[in-house]
Amino acid sequence: MIADGLNVINDEVSSTSFRVSRAAIGPRNFLGNYVNYPAGGRTAENCLLAIKAMVPLDGKVREGVGLLGSPPIEIPRSVERDSRYAHLRTGEALARGLAAKNRFNLRTIGIFLLTRWLGVFLVVLIDLAAIEFFEGMFANAAMALLFALSPVVAAVYYAIVEGCFEKLSPPPPSICSIYDSRFWWVERVWKLHPINFFHLFDGTPFLPVLWRLIGVRMGKRVFDDGVYISEPTLTTFGDECVLNHQSLIQCESQEDGTFKSGRTKIGAGCTIGVGAFVHYGVTMGDGSVLAADSFLMKGEYVPPHARWGGNPAREM
């Protein structure tokens, strides 16, 4: 089972040469978000690689364990509370769950195609209006203005679409099986996420406005240079926060076929570094800083005005 952002690396380059090697991931592994798996990784069967975990290249072959952090430390492969859903992963229960999931997915595909088609129609309508209705001295200026408005209208439209589905969806459960329809609603909203349109506004005052349309509780004068927020309704930012490029606030997790979520609160004046990852159930006190490329684990509390960094993040 693979979460988002897996990068399998099978080439190595030096100043004089390169080589390509086979990269192989063992069976019954679980890979968390943004794992870089290189050729020669020393992992075998039934391993859990946590979010942003460093894959070991030397030492013993790890099997039946979890790996967390960079450098990695061994953790339990699974936790006892996740076993309550084990009966849904085999036999008739699994067959029924997969069939129901496929039916739900078909409806999601239909919703996705319909909302995207309406978005394309709206943009094409604006562009055709620019060509059709403007003539004379100011025609070029009017056309340029309407063409420039097209991506803005598209971003606002898709933000409103996701905001509506956020309101229609049941609240994300704190814990459930991935074969539970409440998780499928969460997954549906992910598929409708307009993040590609949002990146047009990175670093501008308009991006926090779009996040508010979706449902994020966003304070005043927040600078956003390209954050990704997976669960808008579970995320809160205070005033004057700084969110750097490719930072990520993820208020959920999937572990061994189990979905978990929790609210994350970023206090006023906080800074999230470039590429930093903030997990669910986190509280960052006012004025605190998370360093670049750090992983702030679930349930952590960062005191006000503290500086944390590393993977997993600790006070610096």
Image (cartoon, helix red, strand yellow):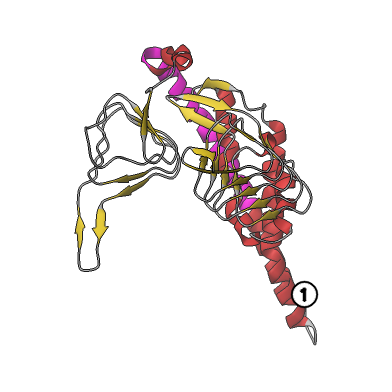
* Residue 298 appears left or right of 95: right
The residue lying toward the viewer, choosing from 236 and 112, is 236
For the stretch drawn in magenta, the main secondary structure is helix
* Residue 69 appears left or right of 208: left
Residue 151 at what x, y percent from top left?
Answer: 66, 62
**Vertical position of residue 209 compared to residue 71: above or below:** below
The residue sitting at the front extreme is 316
The residue lying toward the viewer, choosing from 291 and 135, is 291
10 Å crowding of disc 1: few (<14), some (14-19), many (20+): few
Q: Amino acid at mark 1?
A: Phe
Residue 102 at what x, y percent from top left?
Answer: 47, 29
User: What residue do we see at 48% from left, 37% from top?
Assistant: 312
User: What residue do we see at 57% from left, 54% from top?
Assistant: 196
Can residue 110 be seen by looking at this rendering? Answer: no
Q: Which residues are magenta?
A: 90-118
Please say whether residue 87 is one of the residues in the magenta stretch.
Answer: no
Residue 133 at what x, y percent from top left?
Answer: 77, 74
Please say whether residue 103 is one of the residues in the magenta stretch.
Answer: yes
Quadrant into which the C terminus falls: top right
Residue 170 at what x, y percent from top left?
Answer: 67, 26
**Vertical position of residue 187 compared to residue 136: above or below:** above
* Location of residue 266 by image quarter: top right
The residue sitting at the bottom extreme is 137
* Location of residue 238 by image quarter: top right
* Residue 191 appears left or right of 88: right
> What residue did someone put label 1 on?
133
**Vertical position of residue 182 compared to residue 246: above or below:** above
